[in-house]
Amino acid sequence: MSLPGRLTACCLMAWALSSCALFSKPTPTAQQATLKQMGHWQGRLSLKVLQANPEQFSAQFELNGSADAGELSIISPLGTTLAVARWTPHNAQLLQGQKVQDFTSVEALTLQLTGAALPLPALLAWLDVDGPPVPGWQLNAESPPGGRRVFAKREAPLPVLQLTLLLDPP
């Protein structure tokens, strides 16, 4: 097969896989519907961990709930769910495919993933309004007509984190 033919076949396969992912979304449970009533945001996120070997992660996301109980889905550009984080006041879970990890709190979960416990209550407040200040974090948020942008940077403790959220309009 020629190079143009292989490229066309790859593009068609990627399109077919993304179509399957879009149409195979599970039906929301009653708990998910309740969380969505508490709060619902979706858009794109980027997290940079600035250390000796910098790391960057970008994905689409859907967030339902509050700081007390919620669910965050991380979604690939093709529409496949990469991971789901769920939390309550008593515990947190990270689901990646068939793998399930349990944590004592959402802070412990974010510490494991990013090397730093993220201030979830403040981050959720920043999604709608300029939330409360958090020691060690700088916040810059804008609400242009096309959605909300939140830029958060944590310089202390190390490693430095840069979180960017681009929210879709409600």
Image (spheres, rainbow, N blue to C red):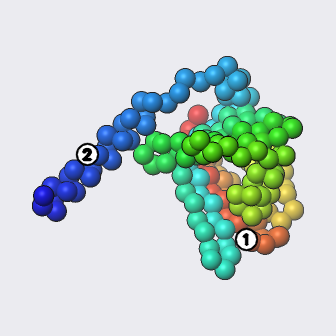
Of the pair 22 and 147, the residue shown nearer to us: 22
Mark 1 or 2: in front is 2
Across the whole image, how many numbered discs are drawn on residues? 2
Q: Position of residue 146 (x, y in %)?
A: 53, 44
User: Is the residue under label 2 in contact with that under label 1 (CB below 8 Å)?
Assistant: no
Q: Quadrant of the C terminus?
A: top right
> Which residue is labeled 2 in the image?
12
Q: Amino acid at mark 1?
A: Val
Q: Residue at x 67, y 64 (%)?
A: 162
The outermost residue toward the top is 30
Of the pair 138 and 99, the residue shown nearer to us: 99
Viewed as shown, does residue 26 lie left or right of 139?
A: left
Q: Position of residue 51 (x, y in %)?
A: 68, 76
Q: Is residue 14 above or below residue 154?
A: above
Q: Is residue 154 above or below residue 43?
A: below
Instruction: State the mark number for residue 160.
Output: 1
Q: CA distance from mark 1 to mark 2?
A: 40 Å
